[in-house]
Amino acid sequence: MTKKNIIIFFTIASLLIVGVNLNPTAKEVTISFLNKLRSEYLYFIQSIQNTIEEHFRQKEEIIRLREEVKNLSQKAILFTAYKNKLNNLLEENNLSFYTPKLQLVEALSYVNINEFSKVWLKFPKFDKNKIYGLLYKGYSAGIVVSKYDKPMALLQNNSKCTYSVYIGKEKIPGVIFGNSQIMIIKYIPPWLSPKDGEEVFTSGLDKIFFEGVKVGKIIKVLDEKSYKSAIVEPYAKIKIPAFFHAIIN
C-alpha cells in the first residue's frame, strides 16, 4: 500500500471513530461524509485502473500497427522487384511499360443518410469522365463514378457496382454485380463450369481494375436460361472505413 493510500485509510478510520461517539445528527453527517469520501476514493481507483488498461490496449494496437507496416513494406519491396522485372521483359519485346498507380482517397459522408452503399470521396485530381476501381486492404471494394461532377463510391453491396471478373485457374469470364452482403456474377458462358469454392478476381478487361485483384469465392452456381450465374462471398468486409485506394492507371 502506498503512502497516500495509508494516509487516506487512517483519515477514514479516525473520522469513523469520532463519528461513533457523536450525537445522532453529527453521526449522520459524519457517515454521509464517509460514504461520499469512500465513493470518490473508489471512483479514483477505478479511473486509475481504466487508464492502465487503456495504456496496455494502446500498446497492443501500436505493436499490431507496426507489424502491419512491416508486412506492407515487404510487399511494397516485392512489388517493385516484380514490376522492374516485368518492365524489363516488356522493354525487350518493344512493349509499353506496365505502371499501375494507386491514389489514397478519403471517405467523407454518405450520399444519402439511409443508403450505406454510396459514399462521397475526397479524391485529388478526380476525372469525372472515368470510372475507377476501388480497393480496401488489397481487395476489390467497389467503383468510383461521377455524380454532380463529384467522386462518388459505389461500394460492392450496391447493385450498380459492376465490373468484369475471372473465375478460377481457367479464367472463366463473367460480369459481377453488387447485391447486399453478397455479389452475383452473371453472363457466364453456359458451356463452362465454375465450381463452388473457386476464387474470383478482376480481369482488367474493362479498364476499371487491373487483372488479379481478389474479389471473393463462389458459394453457389446457378443455371439460367441462356447463361450461368454464381453467388460470391466477397473478401472485403466493408463498414465504411476512413480511407480506400483508387486505381488511377
Image: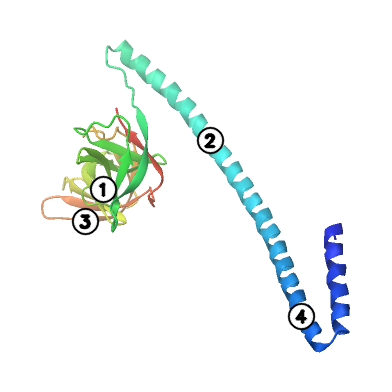
Q: CA distance from mark 4 to mark 2?
A: 59 Å
Instruction: From the viewer's perspective, tell me whether residue 49 is left or right of residue 227.
Output: right
User: Percent position (x, y) of residue 154?
Assistant: 26, 46
Going from N to C along the chain, the mark reached first, 4 or 2, is 4
Which amino acid does the dot numbered 3 rest on? Leu
Check the picture and name the quadrant holding the N terminus: bottom right
Going from N to C along the chain, the mark reached first, 2 or 1, is 2
Residue reaching furthest bottom? Answer: 24
Q: Which residue is mark 1?
A: 194
Q: Is residue 91 above or below residue 26?
A: above
Q: CA distance from mark 4 to mark 3?
A: 78 Å
Q: Which residue is mark 2?
A: 69
Going from N to C along the chain, the mark reached first, 4 or 3, is 4
Q: Which residue is mark 4?
A: 29
Instruction: From the viewer's perspective, tell me whether residue 3 is left or right of residue 195.
Output: right
Q: CA distance from mark 3 to mark 2?
A: 41 Å
Which amino acid does the dot numbered 1 rest on? Pro
Q: Residue at x 44, y 23 (%)?
A: 80
Which amino acid does the dot numbered 4 rest on? Val
Q: Which circle, 4 or 2, is nearer the viewer?
A: 4
